[in-house]
């Protein structure tokens, strides 16, 4: 499986790019100094490829970086970017784009998302997740579906139950509450999971009601991932059935941040959102 664009690799790549640009070198000149192909320099700087500690040493030698602390820090980033992650045992059932997203999510400190038809994976129950996965990938074997459900639950524990849990802000269209997925009992269980999640201090849950009419999120769902230390690593993530897009330009991030705030403004507040979810539960039981 190709190297993952984890945040650690992106940080390392950004630091190496800054060093190169500070010296006024092109990627071609750097490649010649190190003995790499120019494309490898670009892949490393973008975080698409990881490198080993001894390769970091070679780059820093080429850039004449002598500060021991800086060299140690960058070598540590290279080692962290190559470490075995919790999702590695599931590599036979994970697509590259799903793995890349999980890698980003694992390092994020904040996640803002708008969903129009589905409950986000981080808040799904096993029964709901199984029904969704089976509907979206009908050719999967029962064993593969079980494995993907396990991935989803492990994701939840990894980011929502860690010592510094992910700051999660979710806006759900009312349609995602009304569409019965997995049968009424499973949907009731899912909605009750949402009610419990909405009481957790690191989770903010709002519902965009049908009564809101036309709204800023009509173009579809998206996720904004934010990372510690370096805001230039923040990402907007959108996907379709066959592809995904990661937007990293500052202008895109600003656009989607404003979009999310507009959606939040049109949605019910947290208390009214819980009331609506509870009302939908009563309609199902």
Image (cartoon, rainbow, N blue to C red):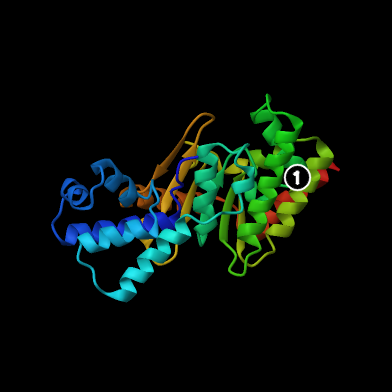
Displayed quadrant of residue 39 = top left
Who's the residue at 76% across and 32% down the image? 142
179 or 14: which is nearer to us? 14
Q: Position of residue 98 (x, y in %)?
A: 54, 41
Residue situated furthest right in the rendering: 285
Instruction: Check disc 1 and report the residue beneath it.
Output: 126
Displayed quadrant of residue 37 = top left
Q: Is residue 30 left or right of residue 134?
A: left
204 or 88: which is nearer to us? 88
Whether residue 226 is visible to the viewer of this picture, yes or no, is: no
Q: Is residue 65 left or right of residue 279?
A: left
Q: Position of residue 281 (x, y in %)?
A: 79, 46
Q: Position of residue 261 (x, y in %)?
A: 46, 54
Count residues near mark 1 (Cα–Cα under 10 Å), then give few for <14, some for 14-19, many for 20+: some
103 or 167: which is nearer to us? 103
Q: How many marks?
A: 1
Whether residue 82 is visible to the viewer of this picture, yes or no, is: yes
161 or 46: which is nearer to us? 46
At mark 1, the secondary structure is: helix
Residue situated furthest top in the rendering: 139
Q: Quadrant of the C terminus?
A: top right
Q: Is residue 27 above or below residue 131?
A: below
Who's the residue at 13% across and 57% down the image? 24
Who's the residue at 20% across and 57% down the image? 20
Who's the residue at 27% across and 48% down the image? 41
């Amino acid at each position: 499986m190709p190297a993952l664009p984890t945040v650690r690799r992106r940080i390392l790549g950004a630091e190496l790019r800054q060093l190169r640009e500070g010296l006024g070198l092109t990627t071609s000149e750097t490649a010649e100094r190190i003995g790499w192909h120019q494309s490898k320099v670009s892949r490393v700087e973008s975080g698409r490829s990881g490198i080993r500690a001894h390769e970091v040493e070679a780059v820093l030698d080429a850039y004449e970086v002598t500060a021991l602390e800086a060299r140690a820090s960058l070598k540590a980033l290279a080692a962290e970017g190559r470490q075995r992650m919790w999702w590695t045992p599931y590599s036979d059932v994970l697509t590259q784009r799903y793995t890349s997203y999980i890698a980003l999510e694992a390092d994020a400190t904040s996640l803002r998302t708008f969903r129009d038809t589905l409950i986000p994976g981080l808040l799904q129950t096993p029964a709901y997740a199984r029904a969704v996965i089976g509907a979206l990938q009908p050719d999967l074997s029962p064993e593969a579906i079980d494995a993907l459900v396990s991935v989803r639950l492990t994701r939840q524990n990894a980011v929502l139950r860690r010592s510094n849990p992910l700051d999660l802000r979710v806006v759900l269209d009312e349609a995602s509450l009304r569409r019965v997925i997995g049968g009424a009992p499973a949907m009731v269980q899912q909605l009750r999971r949402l009610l419990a999640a909405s009481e957790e201090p690191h989770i903010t849950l709002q519902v965009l009601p049908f009564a809101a009419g036309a709204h800023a999120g009509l173009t579809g769902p998206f996720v904004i991932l934010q990372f510690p230390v370096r805001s230039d690593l923040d990402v907007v993530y959108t996907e379709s059935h066959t592809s995904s897009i990661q937007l990293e330009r500052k202008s895109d991030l600003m656009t989607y941040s404003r979009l999310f705030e507009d959606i939040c403004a049109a949605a019910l507040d947290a208390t009214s959102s819980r009331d609506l979810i509870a009302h939908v539960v009563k309609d199902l039981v």
